[in-house]
Amino acid sequence: MTIIRQPSLFGIQELFDMEPTQKYEAIISAVDLDSMYHQVAKKSRLGAPEELNYRP
């Protein structure tokens, strides 16, 4: 079994030293929300393509 090491954004002591609002701001600013939004955003506002429609 291989071990996957992932770099951390902050050390534990740094997080303990920060105020709660500073923690949230630092974590959210490190995450790229635009790329996540484009991955989950709906591609069309018109609904499903016609070939996916089926008769009841």
Image: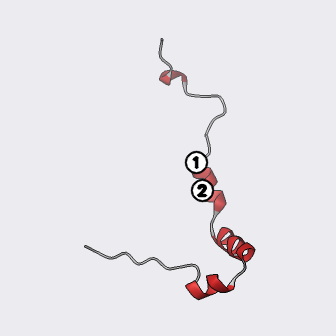
**Numbered marks: total:** 2
- Does residue 33 sit above or below 23 in this rendering? above
**In terms of depth relative to the viewer, which is nearer, 54 or 23?**
23
Q: In this picture, is 20 found above or below 45?
A: below
Q: Residues within 10 Å of mark 2 (few under 14, many from 20)?
A: few
Q: Real-space Cα distance between discs 1 and 2?
A: 7 Å
Residue at 61% from the left image edge and 58% from the top image edge: 35
Pointer 2 residue: 36
Return the x and y of residue 49 as percentages of the image width and height.
55, 26
Q: Position of residue 20 (x, y in %)?
A: 71, 74
**Residue in view at x 67 percent, y 86 percent:** 17
> What residue would you read off at disc 1?
40
Here the colouring is secondary structure
The residue located at (63%, 64%) in the rendering is 32
As drawn, 48 above or below 3: above
Looking at the image, do the residues carrying marks 1 and 2 touch, with CB atoms under 8 Å apart?
yes
In the image, taking residue 3 as reference, residue 42 lies left or right, namely right
Labelled disc at residue 19:
none
Report whether 50 appears left or right of 30.
left
Rendered image quadrant of residue 30: bottom right
Residue closest to the far top: 56
Name the residue type under label 2. Answer: Met
On the question of residue 23 being in view, the answer is yes
| Secondary structure under the numbered disc 2 in the rendered image | helix
Q: Secondary structure at mark 1?
A: helix
